[in-house]
Image (cartoon, helix red, strand yellow):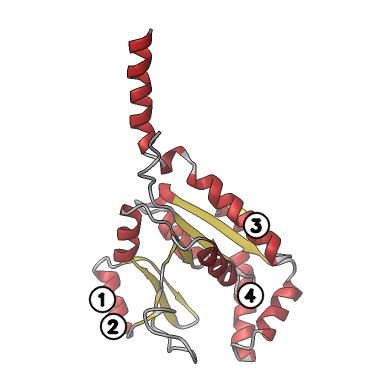
Amino acid sequence: MQTTGRRGLLIILSSPSGAGKSTLSRRLLEWDPSLTFSVSATTRAPRPGEVDGKDYHFLKPEQFKRSVADGGMLEHAHVFGHFYGSPRAPVQQAIEEGRDVVFDIDWQGAQQIVNSALGPNTLSVFILPPSIRELRRRLETRGQDSPEVIAKRMQKSWDEISHWGSYDYVLVNDDLDQTFDRLKTILTATRLRRLQQPWLVEHVRRLQDEFEDVS
């Protein structure tokens, strides 16, 4: 039986900063090397150790705005004084080749993708923290941001959380290993959706022809 020709899936992970979406994204890519990560573009400066083209595509504001105007961004948003977006071309190529793409984006970007022409091929998952106190603790212990930036992220966290109801699935990340196991189960099941398997149409036609031959 032929089971090739699966349509690519856009896997959207969103959460307030510190809830675990970036760690879960990395784990997904390690679990399944066939997955492609959508490297976002941003106008913020690189952090120590970040590599252009690997962690982000670092663009000047005028470059970013030009790309948006030309339709080069699948989604984009303005967050904490900087622009962020997902370049369209590599995502489109991956989907056409039947490869799944992982997005680590906020709710604004998620809604833009869900409402786009690629919307039917999306899987959206929102990651909730077990508590607000734990969310703050994670932000403080990872040592990436100043107290001022942490305060801004905490202020924005409820705005992010308030959009949980617009996602296909919602996971509470109180245990990273268990959350990751649930995420793998969701992805495995979604890949088997009828919409993701266009080869089924031809298979059913062959079954119909065979049924008529043997009847």
Do the residues bearing badges 1 and 2 touch, measured as CB atoms within 8 Å? yes
Residue 18 marker: 4
Residue position for label 3: 181
Q: Nearer the viewer, mark 4 or mark 1?
A: 4
Q: Secondary structure at mark 4?
A: loop
Task: Give the mark nearest the N terminus, 4 or 2.
Answer: 4
Q: Label 3: how many residues lie within 10 Å, few (<14), some (14-19) or many (20+)?
A: few
Q: Label 2: how many residues lie within 10 Å, few (<14), some (14-19) or many (20+)?
A: few
Whole-percent x and y of residue 10?
44, 56
Residue 143 as seen in the image, left or right of residue 62: right
Residue 168 in sight from this viewpoint: no
Q: What is the CA distance from the residue labelled 2 to the residue labelled 3? A: 42 Å
Task: Give the mark nearest the N terminus, 1 or 3.
Answer: 1
Q: What is the CA distance from the residue labelled 4 to the residue labelled 2? A: 30 Å
Task: Give the mark nearest the N terminus, 4 or 3.
Answer: 4
Label 1 amino acid?
Answer: Arg
Residue 66 marker: 1
Do the residues bearing badges 4 and 2 touch, measured as CB atoms within 8 Å? no
Label 4 amino acid?
Answer: Gly
Q: Nearer the viewer, mark 4 or mark 3?
A: 3
- Work out which quarter of the rendered image holds the N terminus and state it: top left
Whole-percent x and y of residue 35?
45, 61
Residue position for label 2: 62
Residue name at image x 60 percent, y 70 percent: 16
Task: Give the mark nearest the N terminus, 2 or 3.
Answer: 2
The part of the image, by quadrant, that contains residue 212 is top left
Q: What is the CA distance from the residue labelled 1 to the residue labelled 3? A: 40 Å
Q: What is the CA distance from the residue labelled 1 to the residue labelled 2? A: 6 Å
